Amino acid sequence: MQVDLLAGTSHRTAVMPERRPTLLLFDSGLGGLTVLSEVVRCRPDADIVYVADDAAFPYGRLSEAALVERVLAVMERLVARFHPDLVVIACNTASTLVLPALRARFPIPFVGTVPAVKPAAERTRSGLVSVLATPGTVARDYTRGLIESYAGGCEVTLVGATGLAGLAEAALKGEAIDDGAVLAEIAPCFVEREGRRTDVVTLACTHYPLLLARLRRLAPWSVDWIDPAPAIARRVAALLGPARERPDAGEARAVFTAGTRLSGPARIALAGFGLAQVEIEAMPA
Ligand code: DGL
């Protein structure tokens, strides 16, 4: 299967508006915050709508048909309400499946987040690379196509973590999480073969960089963890064009489709990402 690297991004270019651009960042939950930070670093002047489809979290357990239907339905509502100039699907589980349907449905540029297989293959010295993702992303034809196209010379271990996104959310909300549970999820990434060891692990779920310090601490040996967020932000900036000189800072708000798990510490964490304004756009799963 031939995969175009740009398939993870959009071929449409955004028309640079005179007004501040509105960017919609979309994830199943709080993982897209790792992308948000990088996007704001590149375009502090953009108005940001961060959307967590928490009513349907986690996406990793949904069937492909259910996920396509869900994301299209939620996006329909969001586009009608916020009229974004560009949408970032800050979720690998959705991007590896739904981008073609989104691009066919909406005349807006969509930037996706897909497993950073090519950079991992370029960086490895041992030839042993692991992709840590949700079970959904691991099962995708798209992910296997990336590996065939860009990592032919490597041995790639696909690790589908069932609970790691949930653990990342819990940690961000200030809940105590068990190191043993995190280690059990990442352990299959660490492979030893004929004196060689895995030396690159690509974080193919936007939730996982939230746990990066803990992943480094718990890793059986030191590896290069790849977080694709800076590359995604550069792509967004390239599509939007340069910011105006001395722009006003953009406004940011968070929108949740359920909002039922929004404890006080969760709101404090959101405020730390510049999202003090939180709204509910109810969309039951
Ligand atoms: N943050 C999402 C991703 O990048 C997935 C988490 C979930 O399973 O909903 O894949």
Image (cartoon, helix red, strand yellow):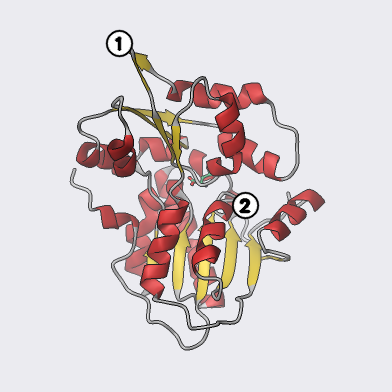
Crowd class of label 2 (few under 14; some 14 to 19; many from 20; radius 10 Å):
many
As drawn, the residue found furthest toward the bottom would be: 18
Quarter assignment of residue 101: bottom left
Q: Position of residue 163 (x, y in %)?
A: 58, 32
Q: Nearer the viewer, residue 117 or 254?
A: 117
Local SS, label 1: loop
Local SS, label 2: helix
Tell me, yes or no, whether the two marked residues, 2 and 1, touch with CB atoms within 8 Å: no
Q: Residue at x 37, y 76 (%)?
A: 14
Q: Which mark is residue 194?
A: 1
Q: Nearer the viewer, residue 198 or 88?
A: 198
Q: Which quadrant holds the N terminus?
A: top left
Q: Residue at x 39, y 35 (%)?
A: 138
Which marked residue is nearer to the observer: mark 2 or mark 1?
1
Q: Earlier in the sequence, mark 2 or mark 1?
A: 2
Q: Position of residue 102 (x, y in %)?
A: 38, 63
Q: In screen coordinates, is 146 left or right of 170?
A: left
Q: Residue at x 65, y 43 (%)?
A: 169
Q: In screen coordinates, is 203 left or right of 123?
A: right
Judging by the rendered image, the residue that carries numbered circle 2 is 54
Q: Position of residue 48 (x, y in %)?
A: 57, 70
Q: Check the image and report above or below for 121 versus 100.
A: above
As drawn, the residue found furthest toward the left would be: 2
Q: Check the image and report above or below for 198 versus 61.
A: above
Residue 163 visible in the displayed image: no
